[in-house]
Image: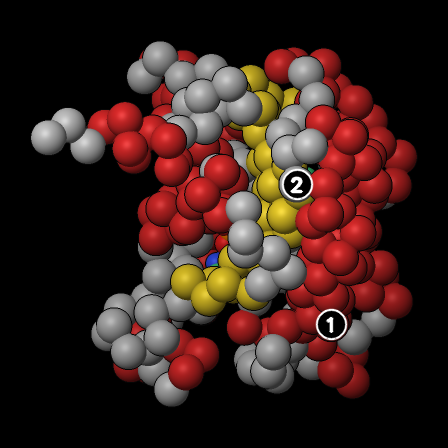
Amino acid sequence: MNAQPYLSQLFSLDGRVALVTGGSSGIGRAIAGALARAGAGVVVVARREDQLIATIDELTSEGCRAGWVSGDLGSRDGVRAAAEAAAAVFGEPDILVNSAGVNLRPPMDELGEDVWDTTMTVNLEAPFLLGQRFGPGMAERGFGRIIHVTSQQAHRAFVRSGAYGVSKGALESLARSQAEAWSPYGVTCNTLVPGFVMTPLNARLSSDPEKVAALAERTMVGRNGLAEDFAGAAVWLAGRSSAYVTGQSIYVDGGFSVH
Ligand SMILES: NC(=O)c1ccc[n+]([C@@H]2O[C@H](COP(=O)([O-])OP(=O)(O)OC[C@H]3O[C@@H](n4cnc5c(N)ncnc54)[C@H](OP(=O)(O)O)[C@@H]3O)[C@@H](O)[C@H]2O)c1
């Protein structure tokens, strides 16, 4: 028996267009690669051009459809400009992945308005504005997938959650509100919840072997996360077979959250 047609029916993203913020590094890069290899035309948005180009070169060299937009999601105007530029590459997206994020965590006593504002703009407002820009169009076309990347800190205080935890908690609420609004029209909205993943975002923590080992110990699988761990969940959430899954927080954390 040839399993390919059945698997394609469940998971193929052929003909879809995806926009992945933060798709030039870490979890976002792994997700962008997974969606592209599953057939979607993928547009990656972040600031640093060298990382964007490296990401897209890797994918196009494998025969994938991929493009990039350099944009700063740290202001409302920046988000709007990036959204328009991204939609101009392969057309309006069917899949929106919000993985861009900043992780600024001074102790609560020292948490100032600048860190608060930056965190809320990149981690929460950008996903909201991109949802407002693309969600209604997805609903009108009868198909859409919005996937946010949140954090353990959406659910529990942990290593100085500060403004970061607040932004991720609100992002999970945003996913539920978006799901409520657009699911009747074929647009699902969910979040992927990582544990501790070895990416540039937490380079400081990753460079401390004792902390890395202690965090791995807190999982059930016995290791910390890798960006590649998000590939399968992202393809599934982006495809047609997840049509009845919406408003959910899906933990990809090796069991970290249930210990
Ligand atoms: N790693 C973990 O353990 C972990 C755990 C829980 C949740 N998360 C979440 O997972 C997501 C991805 O994190 P990661 O670990 O993959 O981090 P990463 O490797 O540092 O990637 C972050 C991405 O966001 C982009 N970005 C940051 N600020 C931006 C801005 N102002 N405008 C546009 N793009 C911006 C970065 O590109 P430029 O810097 O070039 O703009 C980069 O592509 C984040 O939302 C993070 O909060 C990560």
Q: Is residue 217 left or right of 237 when viewed as pictured? A: left
Residue sitting nearer the eye, 207 or 32:
32
Which residue, given by chain and number where applicable, does mark 1 sit on? 166
Residue sitting nearer the eye, 38 or 81:
38
Name the image quarter holding the N terminus.
top left
Q: Is residue 155 left or right of 71 when viewed as pictured? A: left
Residue sitting nearer the eye, 246 or 207:
246
Image coordinates of residue 21 in percent, x first then y, are: 62, 38
Instruction: Please name the residue shown 61% across and 78% down the image.
Output: 155
Name the image quarter holding the C terminus.
bottom left
Q: Which residue is situated farthest in the left direction here? A: 1
> Is residue 116 placed above or below 186 in the rendered structure?
below
> Is residue 220 placed above or below 33 in the rendered structure?
below
Image coordinates of residue 118 in percent, x first then y, are: 79, 55
Which corner quadrant of the image does residue 120 belong to?
A: bottom right
Q: Earlier in the sequence, mark 2 or mark 1?
A: 1
Instruction: Please name the residue shown 72% across and 47% down the image.
Output: 184
Q: Secondary structure at mark 2?
A: loop
Instruction: Please name the residue shown 55% across and 18% down the image.
Output: 67
Q: How many marks?
A: 2
> Is residue 163 placed above or below 241 in the rendered structure?
below
Image coordinates of residue 250 in percent, x first then y, are: 50, 63
Amino acid beneath label 2: Gly
Q: Nearer the viewer, mark 2 or mark 1?
A: 2
Q: Which mark is residue 186?
A: 2
Q: Secondary structure at mark 1?
A: helix
Circle 2 Cα neighbour tier, 10 Å, few/some/many (<14 / 14–19 / ≥20): many
From the Cβ of disc 1, is ligand 1 less than 8 Å away? Answer: no
Instruction: Please name the residue shown 64% across and 34% down the image.
Output: 143
Amino acid beneath label 1: Val
